[in-house]
Amino acid sequence: MAAVILLVHLAGAACLAAVFPGAAGAGAGLLVFLLGALVARDRALLRGRHSVRGVELGDGAAAVFELADGRRLAGSVAARRNVNRWWVTLPLQGGSRHIVVVTRDMLPAGDFRRLRIWALWGRMAPAAAAPFPV
């Protein structure tokens, strides 16, 4: 995920350098690439203070998110979840536009399968309700 973010920002930087020749294009391209590195560090590598480190899922849309700084936030996940074999997106309900993306390599295979089932059906077996260590 981090590599994809960096590649997309590198492509944007190359486009800026092509459109604005000289020092202005090179400087703008460098800033775009550095922004991509910051975004990759915070979002894809989960190094930020507010990065989600764990998710506890309940029946329906209930979820508790554990952040890197130790806080636990209760919320609910919107119904418009995207589920495929590589990732699951969990958009938060309310005025927030935050989306938690869990990729296949972030969890063991069994836990990722349970997360996909929960995202599709909104419930899981009581024996499988242990927290997910993202």
Image (cartoon, helix red, strand yellow):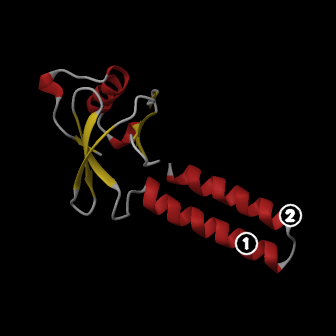
Determine which residue is flagged by label 1. Answer: 28
Q: Residue furthest bottom?
A: 23
Q: Is residue 36 above or below residue 115?
A: below
Image coordinates of residue 109 in percent, x first then y, are 31, 31
Seen at 51% across and 53% down, the residue is 2
Whether the residues at callouts 1 and 2 have beta carbons within 8 Å, the answer is no
| Measured Cα–Cα span from mark 1 to mark 2 | 11 Å
Residue 16: name its quadrant: bottom right
Image coordinates of residue 9 in percent, x first then y, are 65, 58
Residue 56: name its quadrant: top left
Q: Earlier in the sequence, mark 1 or mark 2?
A: 2
Determine which residue is flagged by label 2. Answer: 19
Q: Residues within 10 Å of mark 2 (few under 14, many from 20)?
A: few
Seen at 39% across and 34% down, the residue is 78
Image coordinates of residue 134 in percent, x first then y, are 30, 46
Q: Is residue 74 left or right of residue 42?
A: left
Seen at 76% across and 61% down, the residue is 14
Q: Residues within 10 Å of mark 1 (few under 14, many from 20)?
A: some
Q: Is residue 131 left or right of residue 122?
A: left
Seen at 44% across and 61% down, the residue is 42
The number of callouts visible is 2
At mark 1, the secondary structure is: helix
Q: Is residue 84 left or right of residue 76?
A: right
**Three-letter amino acid code at the position of disc 2:** Val
At mark 2, the secondary structure is: helix
**92 or 35, which is in the foreground?**
92
